[in-house]
Amino acid sequence: MAKKTRYSNEELNEFRTIIMEKLELAKRDYKLLNDSLLGLDNNSTDDTSPTYKIIDEGASALSREETQRLAQRQLKFITNLQAALVRIENKTYGVCRETGELIPAERLRVVPHATLSIEAKRNEK
């Protein structure tokens, strides 16, 4: 039996569905993080006394930095998911960029934007 070199259209449709669901959630989470950074979430100390503002200032700065990091990470995840959709359209989805072998479907169901097999990922380090 010949070795499988790409996923079937049915399998690609399954992966597309998984990616679209994750993409929708990721975009929603990114919007929440962005709204928080822009102060649109109504969770500020603007209506409290100056004493609470001083106490909260340090924690607020740390929280804002963490929110920015989370937003950047979420945006990268969104970009990776969108790139995976392009690979599905090109019918190159699921092919390890190092080995040229198919990435196991189980891995792609968990990490749908993966471009490396587990073996290639281990060798990368």
Image (tube, rainbow, N blue to C red):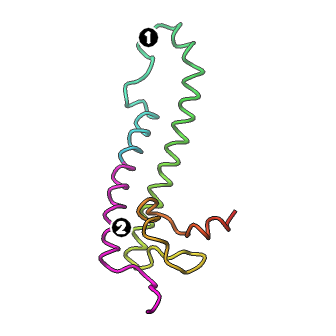
Q: Quadrant of the N terminus?
A: bottom left
What type is the residue that disc 2 sits on? Phe
User: Which numbered tag is attached to residue 57?
Assistant: none
Secondary structure found at label 1: loop
Q: Dot 2 corresponds to which residue?
A: 15
Dots 2, 1 in contact, CB < 8 A: no
Secondary structure found at label 2: helix
Q: Is residue 20 above or below residue 86?
A: above
Sequence-first disc among 2 and 1:
2
Task: Report x, y in % for residue 122.
Answer: 65, 65
Within 10 Å of the Cα at label 1, are there few (<14), some (14-19), or many (20+) other Cα atoms?
Answer: few
Task: Report x, y in % for residue 77.
Answer: 48, 55
- Residue at the image position 44 percent from the left and 59 percent from the top: 110
**What's the distance in space between the residues labelled 2 and 1, CA to CA?**
49 Å
Q: Dot 1 corresponds to which residue?
A: 48
Q: Quadrant of residue 88?
A: bottom left
Number of labelled discs? 2
Task: Report x, y in % for residue 69.
Answer: 55, 42
Within 10 Å of the Cα at label 2, are there few (<14), some (14-19), or many (20+) other Cα atoms?
Answer: many
Magenta part of the protein: which range? Answer: 1-27
Q: Is residue 123 above or below residue 52?
A: below
Which residue occupies the foreground of this view, 26 or 15?
15
Task: Report x, y in % for residue 65.
Answer: 57, 34
- Residue at the image position 45 percent from the left and 66 percent from the top: 83
Mark toward the viewer: 2 or 1: 2
Q: Residue furthest bottom?
A: 1
What type is the residue that disc 1 sits on? Thr
Inspect the magenta stretch and tell me whether residue 39 lies in it: no
